[in-house]
Each structure stands twice: as C-alpha cells, then as structure tokens.
Amino acid sequence: MESQVQQVVICADENVEQNSCLSSPPPLKLKPRGRKRRKRDGVRRLGRPFDRNVRAAAWEKGGALLEESMFGKLKKERETARRNCSLRCLSLKDQQRPSSMRFDRHRRLQALNFFNAPLKVEMMAGMSDVEQIKEYEVILWIEVVRPTTRQKGQHFLVLGSQMLTTLRDKIYCLTDKLMQKLNYFLPSGYFCIENVFYNDMRDPDAIDYSDPILKWMHYQGSKGLCNPYGTRAADMATTSFLDLEFRVGKQYTYCHQGNCKHMLMIRDMRLIHKEDVQNALLYPLLRSPFRVHLRKCTICAIYIATKVTVDDKMAPESPCFYCDYCYYVQHYSQDGRLLYNDFRVYDYYHE
C-alpha cells in the first residue's frame, strides 16, 4: 500500500514539473547594441538611410551641398567683407579699388589708428591757470620713434595753434640726459618736414644744423646731381602746426644732439570735441609714454640698478649691475675708502 502511494506522489511531481515547464515564457535573446548595418549591393552601409543618401548625393556632386551649408555661407560672407574692406585692408588690387583710392603698389599706405573718442585727463595738482581753447581748434596725433630701437614710441596730442617748440620740449630721449650729465648738452635741433628744416634757435649757443646740408644740396644742384628746389630753412619757434605742409602717415625726421635722429609721424588729425580737455596749457598731451626696460641689481635682485661695472674682479659677471646700497657695500670700506679701483663704473638709467 505504501509503495503505491509513493508511486502516485512521484507521478504527481513529474506532472507538476512538466506543467511548469510548459507554462514558463521562452528565454529572451539579447541583441548586441550598436549601429545597424545593412547590406546593399554587397556593401555594408552605416547610419540612417536619409543621412546616407544626403552624403552620397553630396559626394557625387563634388561637395556642392557642403559648400551651401551654413558654415560655407559664413565663410563666403567673411571673405566678401574682407575683400570689400577699405580702411584696414589696403592691399587690394587696383581693379577692385575705386579710381579715387588707386595708388602705386610700391608705395602702399600703412593702416592708421584713428582717435575719435573724447580725451579726458585729470587736472594736475597745484595747477590753477586755465587757458580756454578756441573754437574749431584742431588736434593732431603725433608719434615719435627712435629708428634704432623696436620699442613703441611716444604719442603726443598737440593743438594746431601751438608752436613746434612745444612738442620738442616734451620729447624724451636718453641722449639728452646723458649729455646733461657730461655737461655737454647741445640745445640745437631741427624738424625736417617736406624738405623744410625747422631749426630751434631759441638758445644763443644754438647751431643751425641745416646750414651745411643746404649748402651741400645747392652745390650738388649746381652740378645737376640733385634738385634743391623747395628746400629751405625756417624758425621752429615762430611756426605753428597749422603752418605746416605735411602728409598724414608719412615719416619725417627729428634730429638733436648732433646726430641723434628720431622718426616723426603725424598719424591723424581732427576737430576738438566739447568733452575733450579744454585747458590749452595741458597740451601737448602725452597719450602713450616711452616704454623703457629696467634691470634689477645683480646682487640683491630687489632694487633697480643705478650702476654698472665692467671688468670688476669682485663681481659675479661683467658687465654687472648694482643698486646704490650693494655697490657701496662691496666697493667701499666703513670709513668711505675705495677698496680697489681696477675696474670701470658707469651710471645706469634704462635700456
């Protein structure tokens, strides 16, 4: 009897397992994720059919559709604007220029920076004198650069009614300081603008630098070697900027201290605004000062150097730069006696 019961139980368990296997869902087949690849004409193609068709059509037409895209249009607009630009881009061909703007290719103009914004400066401390600027006054932007250096020059703003001597007194040059240190300062100088030498003869000891040049030119002109026509001399102290004949952007010459020459250029000019500085005594205005390079002391590397020594046996290098404190500590005793003198020392200003 028990064996029959066991057989019935076993059969029931087998039926349950069979029923459970039949009722359970089939296992899921996971497909690998990635781009759908389709075969057409034996070649696998990637991407959606629309994208493929667009790229294929663009490729067949030689990139015509790509040129008409958004980036292609922006590029064309930029190139068109660059070709039609007349202020900054001055290297266009003569066929693309108006007849009024054509000039020789070998004498192309330089790109100029124009100043149209009003000029504002703070009043100097202790300055109570005020001179009102006349109506319809002209402001000139003048740049002075030394040709032997590549540093940025000095930029001045002068009034048209001012004399040339006001600009010359404002120009800074290291040669003037060195000549004053040596007690050999020369007050002479001239501006050469459009074949006219404007000499500074305010000092009784001033020398007319243009006299030997004019004599040489007339002598060469008598032989037919040069044409001195229009070359003459004038007084700088009695000539204003409105009396000059000049060309905007052309390079002229400023000479002083014998043979120290600078390049002078009138970059721009305009009428004065109501919001500009109305005190005429503040002109010429120094818009951009002369940038100098200063060296620090080689010993302490803290203070600015004021002395430079050459062939100094106690110096780590030659030439060696010293500040005042390090120089006197190394070369003088406590009672102020020079320890050794087999070296050369010079004053150092800037470079």
Image: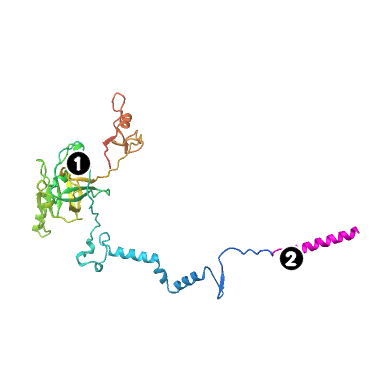
Callout 2: 10 Å neighbours few (<14), some, many (20+)? few
- Gap in angstroms between the C-alphas marked 2 and 1: 111 Å
- Residue 176 shows which numbered tag? 1
Q: Is residue 36 left or right of residue 298?
A: right
Q: Earlier in the sequence, mark 2 or mark 1?
A: 2
Where on the picture, by quarter, is residue 224? bottom left
| Contact (Cβ within 8 Å) of mark 2 with mark 1 | no
Q: Nearer the viewer, residue 56 or 165?
A: 56
Q: What amino acid type should be assigned to the residue bearing mark 1?
A: Asp
Mark nearer the viewer, 2 or 1? 2
Q: Secondary structure at mark 2?
A: helix
The residue carrying mark 2 is 22
Q: Secondary structure at mark 1?
A: helix
Q: Which residues are magenta?
A: 1-25
- Magenta stretch: residue 156 in it? no
Quarter placement of the C terminus? top left
Residue 232 vertical placement versus 44 (above, below): above
